Image: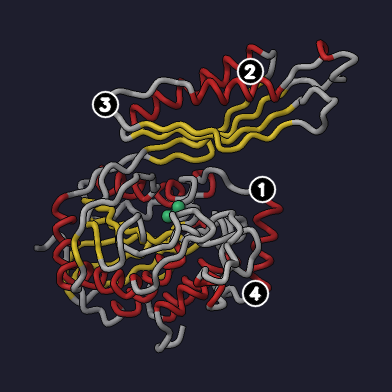
Amino acid sequence: MTPSTTVTELRRDFHRHPEVGFCEFRTASRAAGVLADLGWDVAVGSDVLAPGARLGVPAPDVLEAAYRRAAETDADDRFLPAMRGGLTGVVATLRGNHPGPVVALRADLDALPLAESDAPDHVPAREGFGSRWAGAMHACGHDGHVAVALDLARRLSDLDFPGTVRLVLQPAEEGGRGARGMVAAGVADDVDVFFAAHLGMGLPTGTVCPAIPGLLANSKLRATFRGRAAHASMAPEQGRHALLGAAAATLGVHTMPSFSGHQTRVNVGLLNSGTSSNIVPDTAVMLLETRADDGAVNEDLERRVRDVLAGSAGMYGLELDVELVGAVTTALNDARLADVVERATRAAGATVTGPGAGIGSDDATAFMRRVQENGGAGCYFGIGADSPAPHHASRFDVDEAALPVAVAVLERVFRAGTATN
Ligand SMILES: [Zn+2]
Ligand SMILES: [Zn+2]
């Protein structure tokens, strides 16, 4: 980054090079390099991400291929080696000129396993910054989050703010897999105030929702049903039909009762089984999730889902293995921090708005919870950004006019101080 690099140019650079969870080697190392060059105290790798606390880590060969691709592109060699094996977290800290609390901001680094639209009216395609790495796309706005965090860091490098600012660049937000490893490494233990912000969220450009309520807890599961292959005509009774067990489980999961008084969701999102029409399938692999607006309700839901999986496997004589591959908790926003965000929004000339339609999950809540358990405060807010398509769609795009608004609001949040006024 040169002194004249704009937040839009930063965003486009990250957009061109999308990396999925725990594979953000280029993104994380380059962000670390920018922060170090700005004079921030930068930590990466196992110092900020406990390897064993990660969930849903890709296979070693997948991680290694992503690492090599980053090394052969333009990753920052000063930080890349410490990230090998999917340790793609970055923490940057800077102490201001005035006394005050430790205030953190989370920015997530990961893209999604999705092919980006090449339609001529899709702005990244038209303007030449569409994904160069096939099968991955920044379709949630995290490219914007990293760019905004780096531009914010550049502005705060004048040290004219109270206390200490910590930027937490988190891998693998999608699927709720990365935050817990950074929490386990202690990066939030001394934090007094924790903010997370998300671009888009169905909010129009120029608006900010100072506290997104009702973020859902969730559990992501990978279920593997194992049966026995057999000739589908000559000896079907000798087989154990893994596909049928998984199919029954799919219907069982989706026909569970709703919870009165709560928002709950279940979804079987992937089911792979079988090799040929004349073979009884011996294996079926399923990815599924539960969500709820309350952590205890989500635990209850997950327990019931596991019962359905086990019951369906039993019905067809199958062995079952269920692995937790992602988990997100809930967290409440502190009203005092929402007030700080609201004031910063107005001071930046943006419009305060309520939450948009639809709710999701974000494992930034893991940081918020840790800080709140230690007596601190947390807040998750939304920064409006128009998009022609919803999050996680191949035509999703962040309206770049939202990026300077995000930087302006965040700059005011951090310069204002939070625990002292
Ligand atoms: Zn997302
Ligand atoms: Zn997101």
Report the image quarter containing ligand 2. Answer: bottom left
Return the residue at label 1. 59
Disc number lying in front (2 or 1)? 2
Q: Amino acid at mark 1?
A: Ala
Q: What secondary structure is marked by label 4? A: loop
Q: Nearer the viewer, residue 168 or 141?
A: 141
Give the residue type that dot 3 points to.
Answer: Gly
C-alpha distance separating marks 3 and 4: 51 Å
Quadrant in the picture for residue 285: top right
Crowding at mark 3 (Cα within 10 Å: few <14, some 14-19, many 20+):
few
Q: Cβ–Cβ below 8 Å for labels 1 and 3?
A: no
Q: Nearer the viewer, mark 3 or mark 4?
A: 3
Q: Amino acid at mark 2?
A: Ala
**Distance in Å between CA atoms under marks 4 and 2:** 46 Å
Looking at marks 3 and 4 on the same chain, the residue that comes earlier in the sequence is marked by: 4
Q: What amino acid is at disc 4?
A: Thr
Q: Secondary structure at mark 3?
A: loop
Q: Which residue is mark 4?
A: 73
Comparing 77 with 324, the one in front is 324
Residue sitting at x 32%, y 51%: 189
Left or right of 254, for residue 63: right
Is residue 383 placed above or below 259 in the rendered structure? below
Q: In the orientation shown, which residue stands out farthest toward the right? A: 234
| Residues packed near mark 4 inside 10 Å, few (<14), some (14 to 19) or many (20 plus) | few
Is ligand 1 within 8 Å of the beta carbon of the residue shown at mark 2? no
The residue indicated by pointer 3 is 261
Tell me which residue sits at (46%, 48%) in the image: 181
User: Distance between the Cα atoms at labels 2 and 1?
Assistant: 26 Å
Label 2 SS: helix
Where is residue 46 drawn, in percent x and y? 51, 56
Residue 81 higher or lower than 267, as above or below? below
**Placement of the C terminus among the 4 image quadrants:** bottom left
